[in-house]
Amino acid sequence: MNGAQALIRTFVGSGVDVCFANPGTSEMHFVAALDDVPEMRAVLGLFEGVVTGAADGYGRMAGRPAATLLHLGPGLGNGIANLHNARRARTPIVNLVGDHATNHLAYDPPLASDIESLARPVSRWFRSSVRADALAKDAVAAVQGAFGPPGGVATLVVPADLSWQEAGEPATSRPGAELDTVVDDAVVGAAKALGSGEPAVLLVGGNAVRERGLVAAGRVASATGAKLLCETFPARLERGAGIPAVERLGYLAEFTIAQLQGAKHLVLADALAPVSFFAYPGLPGYLVPDGCEVHTLATGSDDVVGALEALADALGAPPDAAVRQAPVRPDRPTGALNAQTMAAAIGALLPEGAVVSDEGNTSGLFVSGATAGAPRHDWLCLTGGAIGQGLPVATGAAVACPDRPVLSLEADGSAMYTLQSLWTQVRESLDVTTVIINNGSYAILELELSRVGAGDPGPRARGMLDLKRPDLDFVALASGMGVPATRAGTAEEFTQQLERAFSTPGPALVEAVLR
């Protein structure tokens, strides 16, 4: 078999059986080989940012990597923003990048580029294949590189001639590496800090914000009185009725400072010490209070859940000590459609088992609170801060979880980065309900402009932050890609339209006009 066939068969044999693709000429042998390996599901995205973001959403929900298929360095460049988010989320992804045939690179053709320099900043593993007969082994190594631990983006570059050359048989996958067991000293140190009687904070992230980890962390908090917080933008947070609730660190530095005020001990469980997203005049960048001692219980390569359970046991916390979220929903809202009534409608209607891809930004701030007591669901956040993630992540999550409803909570400005995701959702018959929060502006940047000390903005500055002249018509845009779409201007309209979208299989879009 040729290199492309060996590559795909190796991926499938290694548990990588979904490929999000935007291929070009150098990847045509891979495309042709898809008919020879029907076990590989190929999902077409109309922009590379859709491809990489969908692979991120898939990996977060499936717990195993999907492959991407990108065309040379420029294709990789188009997808880098969402690979950055995936790197921050520690999502396993096998990032496959085609390259020119090895003998053609000497001519410096127009699409030639330094792929390695583009890939390295967003990849935890990188290799450029040099022989067709080693391609299958390179594929196995890429899968292992993606799995970690911790998980991450593994980029494999495949020159076109290696795909068409004879490559022999596919390689055999090796089992993934085990998580490291946290040393007893770390558990003892954390127990001493939290049990000291001094004000303390337990900050959890990564794998610790799933139910089992939150139960263990809740036991610790209950036994010690420590404040339990999680990172600002967790990759996958399990929440809802029956799961211990956890407060997220604030996005604004002022909020985080208030949350940590007075703490003498900060214990990190698969989380980093808090820092401000940006530098602001007169505010610190490192947000740990002066005089607060930082203790690391576990990192991304560690068994953080096992460490939290050991910590809870060391503190004598009863197995049922964690306080679980009570089931509660807001009433269906009436009247004007604003951020609060929109959030109440989502909280009243969110289906059991939903997966929420949250890129609601400023206008979506109230949705988290309104859905705290909704039936159990998963919350996927903008881990790296690079907007344009929400719609693709929802797409990949729906591919990973075809039996679960997906809600894409999307701001109007960031929706325009990767709107092509809607086309893929229709093509793949994915059960994704998209809520576009249309307030006619980059509201997050209006907020930031007021905070960075840049002075009183004039009309030209303000014009750079509004989305008018012309207004965006998301109903028309969605309809043009085959998505049934409606527009709501009141709370009643929004509630009715959202309920209909949730109850109808397949993709749908509701444009919530907030004014």
Image: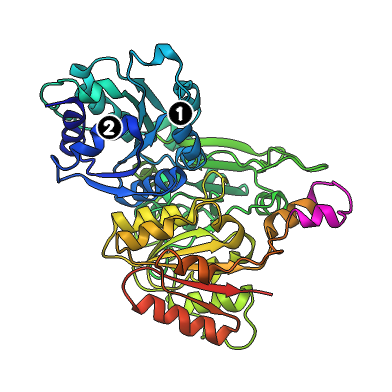
On the question of residue 434 being in view, the answer is yes
- Going 53% across and 47% down the picture, which residue do you hit? 203
Which amino acid type is marked by label 1?
Gly
Q: Is residue 183 left or right of residue 291?
A: left
2 or 1: tag closer to the N-terminus: 1
Question: For the residues marked 2 and 1, what is the alpha-carbon distance in whole angstroms?
Answer: 21 Å
Disc sitting over residue 73 in the figure: 1
Whole-percent x, y for residue 345 in the image: 51, 79
Residue 143 disc label: 2
452 drawn magenta: yes
Q: Position of residue 485 (x, y in %)?
A: 46, 74
Magenta region: 451-464
Q: Quadrant location of residue 352?
A: bottom left
The coloring applied to the image is rainbow
Crowding at dot 1, Cα within 10 Å, few <14 / some 14-19 / many 20+, comes out as many
User: Identity of the amino acid at label 2?
Assistant: Val
